[in-house]
Each structure stands twice: as structure tokens, then as C-alpha cells.
Image (cartoon, helix red, strand yellow):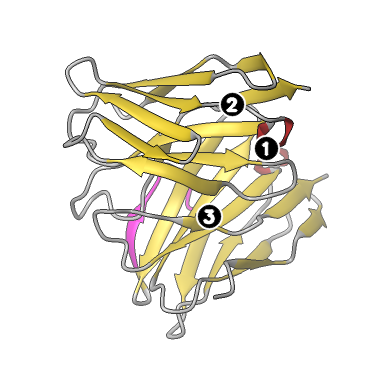
Amino acid sequence: QQQVKQSPQSLIVQKGGISIINCAYENTAFDYFPWYQQFPGKGPALLIAIRPDVSEKKEGRFTISFNKSAKQFSLHIMDSQPGDSATYFCAASSHGSSNTGKLIFGQGTTLQVKP
Amino acid sequence: KAGVTQTPRYLIKTRGQQVTLSCSPISGHRSVSWYQQTPGQGLQFLFEYFSETQRNKGNFPGRFSGRQFSNSRSEMNVSTLELGDSALYLCASSHAGNQNNEQFFGPGTRLTVL
């Protein structure tokens, strides 16, 4: 129930295309869903996050779509650029004294954007 | 504001030794969480500290421990190292470890156990 399942494991997209990464969860207590971007040799960097009271959030070329009934959320990267080539992680957390400071991560998606 | 810093960046140890890793959170952040990242298991939560108290703990053996100081800096210790402890250890800080859980990660410490 604590798992977050992420797909695909790897993704190759042409420059200018749309990259889509999907995540699914079981725990209905999750109430915070961030996406992180990680480059080799670096720590994960927070990209964008959403709460279940909205169905979509957009920041620049990055959009999170959230489907509460299906318990799924996805990251869309519009106009993908070679500089977007990185590993992307979805995550989830819930508030409450037993969950403080704890993010549950998906397994990651390695994105390659071809010039 | 300076980001989260971790020292050292790289460590090589042998089985049976112990190791201490350090994390300095973003100024003003009082919550520090630690994660282990491996190719096989991904990112896994170790524990979280707030105001010098461990508030949450993941499913790791007791060989993994940590502490937090009054200035919010945190250390984690791994005793009796095993080969499987080779990993990238990441710390993340957040303002108060509140329900937003907006965490900012450091660059990590790469631990290799030989």
C-alpha cells in the first residue's frame, strides 16, 4: 500500500516532443505528490508538486495531471529539450505524526531527449 | 540561500568499519530527512529529524542511526558496514517537516564498501 509505481522505466523522445511519465499509487491517504529531476552525480531537484484538490498544475513546460479516482498522476514535459535528459522520480507522502519527512518514491524514469 | 550541503562527497570503507555522514540543511529549515539510493531499491527513506528528535524511521536495521544538533545540522552513522550498504546517501531539508513535505535535497555522499 505504501508503493508508488512508475512507468516507463526509460523513455526516448525527439527534441520538441512531449515526454509523459506515469505514476500510480494505492494509499488513499497520500496527499502530496512531487516530481523530482536528477542529473548524474547530483541530488534530486524538486520540479513541481500537486495536491489532490486540483487536477492539473502547470509550471513552464512541466505539467502534472492528477486523477484522484484512478489514483494516478503523470508528468508531461512539453517541447522536450536535450537538457531535459535526466532521471525523473515521482513521489508521494501523507501528513500525520507517523509520516513526517517521509517521501515514497517511484522507481524512476530515465529520459533521453534526442537532438 | 545556500542549498543543502553534504560531506564528504565520496567515501570508501571496508566491511565491518563504521562511517559518519554529515548534512547541513538550508538556513531556517529545521527538518532533515535521510534517504538511501541504490540502483536496485531506488530511493528509500531512512529517518527524519526535527528539533534534535527523531520523528520518523524507515525499515532499516539498527546499524543505521542518526542525530540532529541544535543548529539543525544532522549526521547519520552506519556501523558494521556491509557490502550492500554501498549507495548514494542523500539528505533533504524542509522548513518544518509539515504536511507539504517540500523537501530539498543535497548532492549526496557516495559510499563504497569494499
Residue B13: x, y in percent? 80, 55
Element type at mark 1: helix
Mark 1 or 3, nearer chain start: 3
- Name the residue that disc number 2 marks: A79
- Identify the amino acid type marked 2: Asp
Parent chain of label 2? A
What number is the disc on residue A68?
A: none
- The part of the image, by quadrant, that contains residue A4 is top left
In the foreground, A106 or B63: A106
Which is nearer the eye, A36 or A57?
A57
Q: How many marks?
A: 3
Q: Residue B59 colored magenta?
A: yes
Q: Are marks 2 and 3 on the same chain?
A: no
Residue placed at 78% from the left, 47% from the top?
Answer: B112
Q: Secondary structure at mark 3?
A: strand
Q: Answer yes or no: is residue B63 visible.
A: yes
Quadrant in which the N terminus of chain B appears? bottom right
Disc ID at residue B64:
3
- Mark 1 packing: few (<14 Cα in 10 Å), some, or many (20+)? few
Apparent side of residue B24 relative to residue B48 in the rendered image (left or right): right
Give the chain letter at badge 1.
Answer: B
- Provide the residue designation for mark 1: B84
In the image, what residue occupies the spot 34% across and 76% down?
A: B51
Disc 1 residue type? Gly
Mark 2 to mark 3 CA distance (whole Å):
43 Å
Q: Secondary structure at mark 2?
A: loop
First to last magenta residue range: B54-64
| Residue B107 drawn above or below residue A25 | below
